[in-house]
Amino acid sequence: MAKLSTVPDQINFADEEAKILKKWKDEDTFQKSVALSKDRPHFTFFDGPPFATGLPHYGHILAGTIKDVVTRWAHQNGHCVQRRFGWDTHGLPVEHEVDKSLGIKGPQDVYEMGIGTYNQHCRSIVMRYSAEWEESVNRMGRWIDFRNDYKTLYPTFMESVWWAFSELVKKGLVYRGVKVMPFSTACSTPLSNFEAGQNYKDVVDPSAFVGFKQEGHENRYLVAWTTTPWTLPSNLALCVHPELQYLVAKDKTTGKEYVVMEDRLFELKNENLEVVEKMTGKQLEGVKYEPLFPYFKHLREQTGAFRVLNNTFVTTDTGTGIVHQAPYFGEIDYQVCKENEIITKDMVVCPVDEKGLYTKEVPDYAGLYVKDADKLILKHLKETGHLVRQSDCKHSYPFCWRSDTPLLYKAVPSWFIRVESIVPLLLANNEQTYWVPAFVKEKRFANWLRDARDWAVSRNRFWGTPINLWVSDDLEEVVAPSSIAELEELTGHKITDIHRESIDHLTIPSKTGRGVLRRVPEVFDCWFESGSMPYAQNHYPFENRKIFEENFPADFIAEGIDQTRGWFYTLLVLSTALFNKPPWKNLICNGLVLAPDGSKMSKRKKNYPDPMEIVHKYGADALRLYLINSPVVRGENLRFREEGVRDLLKDVFLPWFNAYRFFVQNVQLYEHDTQQQFVMPQEVKSENVMDRWIESFTNSLVGFVRKEMNAYRLYAVVSPLTRYFDTLTNIYIRLNRKRIKGDSGVEDQLHALAALGRVLVLIVRLMAPFTPFFSEYIWQNLRKVTGAKEESVHFAMIPEANESLIDENVERRVEAMRNVIDLVRLVRDREGIAVKYPLKEMIVINRNSQYLEDIESLKHYVLLELNVRKLTVSQDKNKYGITLKADPNFKLLGARLKGEQKKVADYLKNKITEAELEQFLAEGKLTVLGHELTSEEVAVSYANNTSAPGEHGYQTHSDAKTIVMVDTSEDESLVEEGLCREVTNRVQRLRKQAKLISTDSASVHIVVQPADSLVGQVLTARKAEIEAATGTPITIGAPTKTATATSKSAIKDAEVELWLFSDTDSSFEGVTVFNGSKKIRIPLKTSNGTLEKYHDLLYNVRSAFDLWNGKISLKDESDALVHPTVEISSLAGRKLTVS
């Protein structure tokens, strides 16, 4: 078994990750792991496809990290996990980039260029940033297959999309209709409501109060309010609330009468009005008015347009209570006008083209962009006396998420999927799924499903999967080929690609005498494609039928909370419509990553650090852990802070690294001292309570993590994992340092080393899915002493908790000890008393006798860690002047008691008796002023009842159950001992500053000013004690030569200056050894004795150069081998070379 490699004093985490990444690539580690798992049960994972036309951001990195953690966990729990990367290659993001680069202004430009040429440009950029994506994903440590990816442009993928749509056609779930949709005039295409909701901005629009002249009343005007004057030429009706009150207000100067809702009269801003009539909205129903513009006045005779309608959607919080209806530019307007037969299913009054320009139907403004026409329209209305009032209105308005231009709402002929008819099935299938967090499933997503509308899946674009519908001119005959083969049979043409340029010209002979059927011009909404990925990525049902059917639904998916209306929704709709199954079993829904100020991250604003800069600075593991140890994995938002990533290095990775390095150093020390190779014993033989505790604590953590990961609760797992390393270093290693170094004998040292080694290996395997790089880094060394055959930690299984090692009693005892240690440390910190200074006594008071027994059982460790001479425990609080105190939970009490909370809280704080609190602790309930209170609403803690805390020499601190009293009074012997430790610490720090190891000999000169200070007296009296503790001879007085290292600092009221002289500087008696370009000097005499044997010299060489593998020998200046029997002292001053 190979020996452990020496661990450097410092580590650059990012650099080490780069080395691991290269190792994985060179050794094809990911593919090896897949091959090793091929015969295991499958764990199915669906990866939502991103666009490769933009670079990955923190949202992608977060979702990718969650996916990687869960799939690694599944793999290391005995599953085969296929992880295929997918690319969304069609749709608006691609076309928009091409339109910008080619100067495309509208669809006509594309037709003139040729769809084939245009689509070729699209094809050429779809993978523009694929290399950057792959590099970024790999650098984050995510294992996913880019070689066997899927792309939505693959003919196999598109063919499965065709199959899915043809199945929906057969089920009667597809129809053609008109829908008012968010429309991007810059991209000349409708958007889904989800897309429209991605980019709202505050804008200032004209606020116009417009008078519609009532027929039969010369001076009466129905006043409606609008922020879209450009829709007024298309007005066909007005709408009022049937149950609310309206009135007629007459301008006493002009004689004009205005009809408005009673509650909204103030909006007219006219103090010269008098109310002359009142009526309900129901009474206004059917009232006719004159059109503002003549363009569609013929509809009055045809459909009864230009009259007042009733509907309860009208509100009292904005406008005038009379709503202008332009049915082809508003979704509610469309529904209301259709219900009242103002419009019919077959007619369209939409005089605006795909670029947002008025058509010839509105001759006065034809060719003008609608938003630019607002001012001209308002000017016309003012001139004709129809503009009652005008101002500006700041409000939130949707913009195109791709072009950043204002959206219009306009009527678009579309192909729809009947979603409303399957809503009960959607809700039932959603109930079968498991979400983290659950509230997103139960509220946000379920509410969205309940209100689901029919889905307009067609887009008037070019680069996408063409809708596979061939129709007759009258739309009465429809054919939906389900495959390429079927289309070949129907058309008689060989087909290799099914993008528009390859199939638009193909026709199908009519079977009903309607000539030929031609393909509809639209392509699929790219959400239809991504929603089809579970089967399309496998070319189902044409291939891989068994694989798909045995592994559907997916075991796991994950994306951001914004996908509740996007990918999650389309997956469920299509899966329900096709199979009546949910498409996934388990889902993690993450929140959004925001800039530090809480705003949306923006490349333009540069309000966040580049993700790869963070990775190169702190490492991917630190970024991964930061993201998944935050509220964002609970569906909440995260304000990204670079300091948070940096703090994880300090609080988690450095303690972990130091624990690992400490273990390796002491294994090497053990091997050197015993001349025996360390092999990690698998059987636990130690009876030491701290060894038993750390093994129990670690195995309990393993059990907890497994339980929570089985429930996909990453948010519950990561925090205990990160806190573990503080526990390991500050409790176990800190309290057992001397044992691990061998001060208690070889057998006890072996027990301590074995315990530390076992938990390090256990935690490395447990952390592997979360921190894949650093876990691999440590595993490559630790596996040498475990006998593990796995080349990578990611080939090893996640450990099971060893129940035989879990001792709840031991864990309870150490937890009590940790609690007391923390309380006393807080007292020391508050009083400014360093741990170097011993204290006389500490008293621990707690009602629980078991707790006190636990503290007593670990008394040795408590006193040692806190540097206190005496420990006293007691249940008798009265003896020490301690009382009980009630701490009300104001939030809970306020929510339940409302106005009574103040009286109850006052009683709890000022009037409650000790006896009542004792009874409350015994029974768990308390009645105050007629209200029964619980332990959740009131906590009981200790309080120091002395009039002047500290007057008895004791300082106190407490939590809800325990109070500690610490004697902080000074004692001459205790102060001297503290000062002795201070000087010892200065010498040790100076040795470290000079980069000396424990075996390097050195001497120190010390001068204390003033010399007769207490520090000077302690130095003189305890000089030998300090020398023994540091292994460094001390001379009191200033030196006469230049020192290797110096320091000057204050201790109490004295100034202490030290000079250190390393024996390696001048009177060096030792050997200089070269290994390539590296050189070390090995002293033959140290404070621990003389280097006498050749194998001791070789050990120092191996340790210094990390040469643990294979044989080495030494050559002298004449290139002759140094013989193992050489007299070591004869090598003094010689220069040797490693061979």
Image (cartoon, helix red, strand yellow):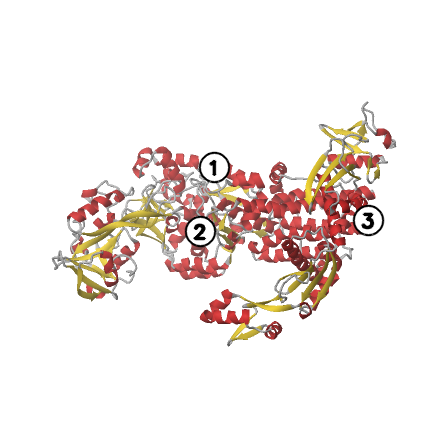
For label 3, the SS is helix
Give the quadrant of the N terminus: top right
Q: Where residue 371 sits in the image (x, y, percent)?
A: 27, 44
The outermost residue toward the bottom is 930
Q: Which residue is mark 3?
A: 746
Q: Dot 3: few (<14), some (14–19), or many (≥20) neighbours within 10 Å?
A: some
- Amino acid at dot 1: Tyr
Which mark's residue is nearer the viewer, 2 or 1? 2
Asked whether residue 1110 appears in the rendered view, the answer is no
- Amino acid at dot 3: Val
Question: In this rendering, would 662 be left or right of 225?
Answer: right
- Viewer-proximal residue among 128 and 854: 854
Q: Dot 2: few (<14), some (14–19), or many (≥20) neighbours within 10 Å?
A: some
Q: Which residue is mark 2?
A: 562
Q: Rounded to the nearest whole Å, what is the CA distance between mark 3 and mark 2?
A: 60 Å
Q: Where residue 474 sits in the image (x, y, percent)?
A: 27, 48
Residue 100 vertical position relative to residue 553 in the rendered view, above or below: above
- Amino acid at dot 2: Asp
